[in-house]
Every structure is written in structure tokens, then in C-alpha cells.
Image: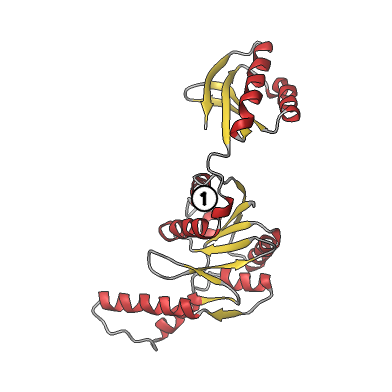
């Protein structure tokens, strides 16, 4: 299973809001031994959102979509999901009950009577309109649910709000409730070393050799202004713990043959 994220909203692309979801998604997945395969940023353009969601549903991947599931005119995600699936929007009775419960809570907190037929309360029920066949995602913050809909194969797209305080616990719930079969705790590691004074072109043959001879991925992260190491390259291997020692030992031997000055070794 591959995991992806879609982050929706003009406020992200305009710089009015700084995205926090990508780093948190990497953290939540990583804690369960799962790598993030890709991330897409999309503005509030219904046509582009629909195309992005259609690709997500067809991918067979598990995808988390952040933002745009409210009921204001600039929230398009629910409608675009339905269009991408070729389905109609329908009011989820479970979502309806939760939204009504939330409205009752707010009225009680304000010391007011709950009036379900008020236009604003009727409008809030739009937040429970999901593509037919969707399941809800519980929201522990204010009870207004998100939703999930299956895609191709074992994949699904899971829709959560843009607010981190709501979205992140909802993503955790999805992972722990629906994705535990794919958890790979302790199944992925990185081991690297700081290399001073090297050019990536000089290291490329060694990197290619390592990937040809070992079931690992090799990475090279150059830096020109690191506050501690200055100009350097972090060269490393990543993969299953049992595959790393031989590959890493060969990498160090290759660097010594190139007479590269080495700095600290890192393990993640």
C-alpha cells in the first residue's frame, strides 16, 4: 500500500497560511513504519480538485485529503469528490445526528434554545452531505465528521478538515482503525554519514553500485551552508534493517577508497 496526501486551499498557495499537514502526515505515518509516497497541493479550483481526486480514487492508494469539506461557498471538496466518483451527494444519517448533537451542545453552552429549523442550522447539515457509499470519520474535537470512500482495489480516500486540531486525530483514527494491516514498525531504517569536500558526481558510481548489489535505496543530501557541518553531503542507505549493515559497510569502504574525509554517522 502506498500513502499520499492532498492539501486543498487557496490560503496555502497564497501564503496566507503555512501548511502544517505534510510534516504531521509524515510523522504519523512514520510512527507506524509507513513512508509517504507523494503529496499534492491544490487551490480552491473545482475542476482541478475533481481531477486530483479522480486520480486518487483510481490509484489504489490510501490518500488523505485535507481541507474544503465545510459548507461555505469556497468549500468544494465534498462536491468534487462526488463528481470524481460519478455519484450524487446524500445526507449521511450518522453525520446528521452528530451535527445536530453538536448544534445542541453549542446552544446549551450559550444558554439558548436549540431551533433546528433556523436557516443557519439547516445549512450546517450540508456538512453531512457525502458521496453515496461513504463512511464517516469521527471528529473528537467538535463531532462534525469527515468521510471516507473506497477507491480502486484496497485503496481509499479519507477526507478531513483543514484545521489541524481536528484533522490530525482523525487521520490517526483512520490509520489505527483501517490501516493496521500495513504497519511496518521497525521495518525501515536509514544509516548515513557526513562526507566533507565531495562532489555528487564523484559519488554517483558508488551509489549505483550499492543499489545494484543490495536491496536498499541510496540517498545523497548536499548542503552548502549547514550551521554545524558547512558544505557537505549526507550519504546514506535506507531499507529493511537486515539489509543495511552489508550495504552500509560497503559504502564506507568505498568512501575510504576515494579518500573522502568523513564526519558523524547517523541512524534513523
Number of on-image labels: 1
- Residue 89 image offset from top left, x and y in percent: 59, 79
Residue 193 sits above or below residue 107 on the image = above
Residue 215 sits above or below residue 43 on the image = above
Residue 250 sits above or below residue 34 on the image = above
- Residue 16 image offset from top left, x and y in percent: 48, 55
Along the line of sight, the residue nearer the viewer: 8 or 12: 8
Residue 176 sits above or below residue 139 on the image = above
- Residue 38 image offset from top left, x and y in percent: 63, 49
- Residue 252 image offset from top left, x and y in percent: 63, 18
| Residue shown at the point (57%, 46%) measured from the top left | 34
Please say whether residue 220 is visible from this viewpoint.
no
| Residue shown at the point (65%, 56%) measured from the top left | 61
Along the line of sight, the residue nearer the viewer: 195 or 155: 155
Residue 257 sits in which quadrant? top right
Please say whether residue 218 is visible from this viewpoint.
yes
Along the line of sight, the residue nearer the viewer: 130 or 123: 130
Q: How many C-alpha atoms fall within 10 Å of the one at disc 1: few (<14), some, or many (≥20)?
A: many
112 relative to 234 in the view: left or right: left
82 relative to 230 in the view: left or right: right
Q: Residue furthest left?
A: 111
Q: Secondary structure at mark 1?
A: helix
251 relative to 142 in the view: left or right: right
Q: How is the image coloured?
A: secondary structure
For disc 1, the marked residue is 25
Amino acid at each position: 500500500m502506498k500513502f499520499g496526501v492532498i492539501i486543498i486551499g487557496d490560503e496555502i498557495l497564497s501564503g496566507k497560511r503555512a501548511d502544517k499537514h505534510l510534516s504531521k502526515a509524515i510523522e504519523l505515518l512514520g510512527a507506524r513504519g509507513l513512508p509517504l509516497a507523494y503529496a499534492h497541493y491544490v487551490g480552491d479550483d473545482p475542476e482541478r480538485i475533481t481531477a486530483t481526486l479522480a486520480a486518487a480514487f483510481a490509484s489504489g492508494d490510501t490518500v488523505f485529503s485535507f481541507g474544503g469539506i465545510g459548507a461555505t461557498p469556497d468549500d468544494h471538496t465534498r462536491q468534487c469528490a462526488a463528481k470524481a466518483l460519478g455519484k450524487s451527494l446524500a445526507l449521511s444519517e450518522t453525520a446528521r445526528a452528530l451535527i445536530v448533537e453538536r448544534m445542541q451542545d453549542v446552544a446549551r453552552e450559550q444558554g439558548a434554545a436549540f431551533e433546528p429549523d433556523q436557516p443557519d442550522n439547516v445549512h450546517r447539515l450540508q456538512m453531512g452531505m457525502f458521496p453515496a457509499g461513504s463512511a464517516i470519520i469521527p471528529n473528537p474535537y467538535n463531532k462534525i465528521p469527515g468521510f471516507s470512500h473506497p477507491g480502486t482495489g484496497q485503496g481509499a480516500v479519507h477526507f478531513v478538515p483543514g484545521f489541524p486540531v481536528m484533522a490530525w486525530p482523525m487521520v490517526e483514527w483512520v490509520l489505527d482503525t483501517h490501516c493496521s494491516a500495513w504497519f511496518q514498525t521497525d521495518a525501515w531504517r536509514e544509516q548515513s554519514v557526513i562526507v566533507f569536500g565531495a562532489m555528487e558526481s564523484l559519488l554517483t558510481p558508488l551509489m549505483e553500485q550499492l543499489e545494484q548489489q543490495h536491496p536498499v535505496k541510496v540517498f545523497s543530501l548536499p548542503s552548502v551552508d549547514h550551521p554545524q557541518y558547512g558544505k557537505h553531503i549526507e550519504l546514506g542507505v535506507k531499507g529493511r534493517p537486515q539489509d543495511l549493515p552489508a550495504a552500509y559497510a560497503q559504502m564506507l569502504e568505498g568512501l575510504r577508497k576515494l579518500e573522502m574525509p568523513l564526519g558523524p554517522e547517523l541512524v534513523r
